[in-house]
Every structure is written in C-alpha cells, then in structure tokens.
C-alpha cells in the first residue's frame, strides 16, 4: 500500500481544510497508508485518526531535517497552506499541492509571488478547490495550465441529518449561528451589526475563537448587543451545535469553498452567505448577501422567520443542494490524481 504524507499547519476542529483532510483519509484509508505532519499547530482529531491508523507528527519534535526525512520516505507528498509548500519543496518525493483560498495576502508582495512561481514548477499537480481559486491561482502563479485541476471540497454528509428543519413558531428566541475562526478572513462584525437590526427575539451564537475575540466582544458592547451575542469558543461537536440553531450565516470577506456552509445546509438550516467566490457556488442564490450588507441580511432573515412556509421551503432546498457536495466524490477524484502521479514516477 502506497504511503501518502499530508503536510499542513494544524488539525484544529473549526478549520475547513482540517475537516476535509480528516474526511478524505477516512474515505481513502483502505486504499492508501497516510501520515500527517503538522508545521505549527495541534491535532484535535487524535481519536479519529488513531482509529484510522494515521500517525501524526509535529515539526517541533522532528525538526526541519526530520520532516524532510519523513517526506522522503513517502511515495507521495500532499501539501497544504503556508509554510508547508515551502518545506515540501525540499523533498525528493513527488509532491502535489492544494490551493484552498482564492486570495493569499503574501502574494500581494511581488518578491513572494515571483518566488512561488519558481517553487510551483516542482510540484506535479495543483488541486484547486473551486473555479474561482483556479482562475486566481493561474493569473498569479502562471504555471502550466495542464498542472491545475479543480476538485470541489466535499463533506461527510452522514454526520448530519440531511432532513428538512421545521420552524417552531412557539419558540421565544430564533437562534442564528456561525462557525469559524476569529480571523481577518471572516466578517464577524457584520453579524454583530446585524443584531442591532433585529429585536430581542433573535440571538447570535458564534462557535470559534482567535486573536480577534476581544475586539469582537468590545464591538458587541459598543453596539449594546452583548446580551444577544453568545461566544461559545472552541466547539468540538459541530453537528450538535448546528442542531441548536434555527438559521445559519457565513459572513466572510473571502473563502476558498465553504465547508461550514455545506455542513449547515446538510443540517437542514436555512443558510445565508456573503456573495464572494467560494461561497456563491455553494449557497443558494436567494441566500446570498453582499459583504458588509447587514441591512439586506436582516430583511432576508426576518422574511423567513415570520413565514413558516418560506422557512420550510428554504430548509428543504438547502438539504438538496448540500447533497451535491458529498465527500465520496471528492475522495474518488483525489484518488485519481494520486494514482496518476504514483504511476508516472
């Protein structure tokens, strides 16, 4: 059985890249042997990966040369995110890379962009998780077009009910929620502002943590909505968290794909998302709003919250859309890429 090593930053539960990797290995572990090397973060999927027989190593324990030694012992390396792509450059093992976002701020620096155009010549294949990601990548890095492939992210839908959710009009509070790290990529402030436009019949639940948490908490107080916004911190059981909600909103400045949106839809939640690449091909058209447009978002939420039929129809439609993004198809497409590279070594 061929050994594939994934090298990435961390395996935190709230990350879309991290959830994707775990789901992929779950569906491919009978076909390939996997290892994971983490460059700087923690592994929060210990139990799941141990059950799959996947060993996880940390760069801080191995050292740079120890990482290269493990990569060289593999049959294929699959690298994700910075700085993993830079480390993988030094392995002699055939390497593929996945582009997970349409925008990386480091590539705004001309010297970095030039450097990465050189680095990417070494990689055998480049997997882009959406059309938007591929188009942006090719315009920035300018590798051979034949190297770039689109494989849409997928979700293990079996973790979610995939049933229409019914709005309970006797509920005193409508619970709105979002899952995501408190990082510049996410537009949490628009959600907080949203709560100034909704009455006390609504509450906002945020599952996540990060460097910007104190800033967001202070913003809540400045708008006098701190009594309507609940910070849950790190949430490990995402299906349970989603089950507690009535409406889901993904408010982001940019996204590569939007696994959290698919998960919310598979949970039957009427789902709204910002109209940016990576989200606008996942969410329903009627659920899109422009970045920062809390007013339009508030109108859309009020409309379904006050109409049982609208709510139920929206819920049914998102469940059907979610089924387009099954991890089964994503895993099969990755296997094709892996075997193509392995068979041409």
Image (tube, helix red, strand yellow):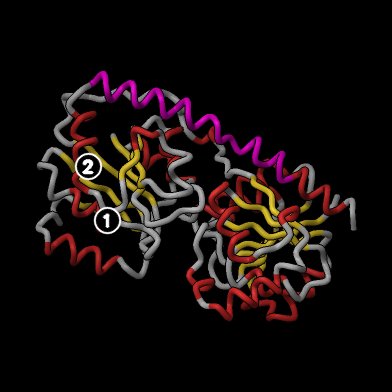
Give the percent coordinates (x, y) of residue 197: 13, 46
- At horizontal 49% and vertical 73% (from top left) the residue drawn is 108
Residue ID at (84%, 59%): 75
Q: Nearer the viewer, residue 171 or 152?
A: 152
Which quadrant would residue 307 be assigned to in this image? top left
Query: Are circles 2 and 1 on residues that touch, CB within 8 Å?
Result: no
Q: Is residue 184 left or right of residue 278?
A: left
Residue farthest toward the top in the current orientation of the protein: 309
Q: Is residue 315 magenta?
A: yes
Question: With respect to residue 267, does 51 lie above or below?
Answer: below
Exactly how many numbered labels are in the figure?
2
Question: Residue 231, which numbered label?
Answer: 1
Residue at left 15%, top 56%?
Answer: 226
**Mark 2 vs mark 1, CA separation in Å:** 24 Å
Residue 39 occupies quadrant: bottom right
State which tag comes first along the sequence, 2 or 1.
1
Q: Which residue is mark 2?
A: 296
Where residue 188 appears, x then y in whole percent?
29, 57
In magenta, the rendered stretch is 308-334
The quadrant holding residue 279 is top left
Question: Mark 2: which secondary structure?
Answer: helix
């Amino acid at each position: 059985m061929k050994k594939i090593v994934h090298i990435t930053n961390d395996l935190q539960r709230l990350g879309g890249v991290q959830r994707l990797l775990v789901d992929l290995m779950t569906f491919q572990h009978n076909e390939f042997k996997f290892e994971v090397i983490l460059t700087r973060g923690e592994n929060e999927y210990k139990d799941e990966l141990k059950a799959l027989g996947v060993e996880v190593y940390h760069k801080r324990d191995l050292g740079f040369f120890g990482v290269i030694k493990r990569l060289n012992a593999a049959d294929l390396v699959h690298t994700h995110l910075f700085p993993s792509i830079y480390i993988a450059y030094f392995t002699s093992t055939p390497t593929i890379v996945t582009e997970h976002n349409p925008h990386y701020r480091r590539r705004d620096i001309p010297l970095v962009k030039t450097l990465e155009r050189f680095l990417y010549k070494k990689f055998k294949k480049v997997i882009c998780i959406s059309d938007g990601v591929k188009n942006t990548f090719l315009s920035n890095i300018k590798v051979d077009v034949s190297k770039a492939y689109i494989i849409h992210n997928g979700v293990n839908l079996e973790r979610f009910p995939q049933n229409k959710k019914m709005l309970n009009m006797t509920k005193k509070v409508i619970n709105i929620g979002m899952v995501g790290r408190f990082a510049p990529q996410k537009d949490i402030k628009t959600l907080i502002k949203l709560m100034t436009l909704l009455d006390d019949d609504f509450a906002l639940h945020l599952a996540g943590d990060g460097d910007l948490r104190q800033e967001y908490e202070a913003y809540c107080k400045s708008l006098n909505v701190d009594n309507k916004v609940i910070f849950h911190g790190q949430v490990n059981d995402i299906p349970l968290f989603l089950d507690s909600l009535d409406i889901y909103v993904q408010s982001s400045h940019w996204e590569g794909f939007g696994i959290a949106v698919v998960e919310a839809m598979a949970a039957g939640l009427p789902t709204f998302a910002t109209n940016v690449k990576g989200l606008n091909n996942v969410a329903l058209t009627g659920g899109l709003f422009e970045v920062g447009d809390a007013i339009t978002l508030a109108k859309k939420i009020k409309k379904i919250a006050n109409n049982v039929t609208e709510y139920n129809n929206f819920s049914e439609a998102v469940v059907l859309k979610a089924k387009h993004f099954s991890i089964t198809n994503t895993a099969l497409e990755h296997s094709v890429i892996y075997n193509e590279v392995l068979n041409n070594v």
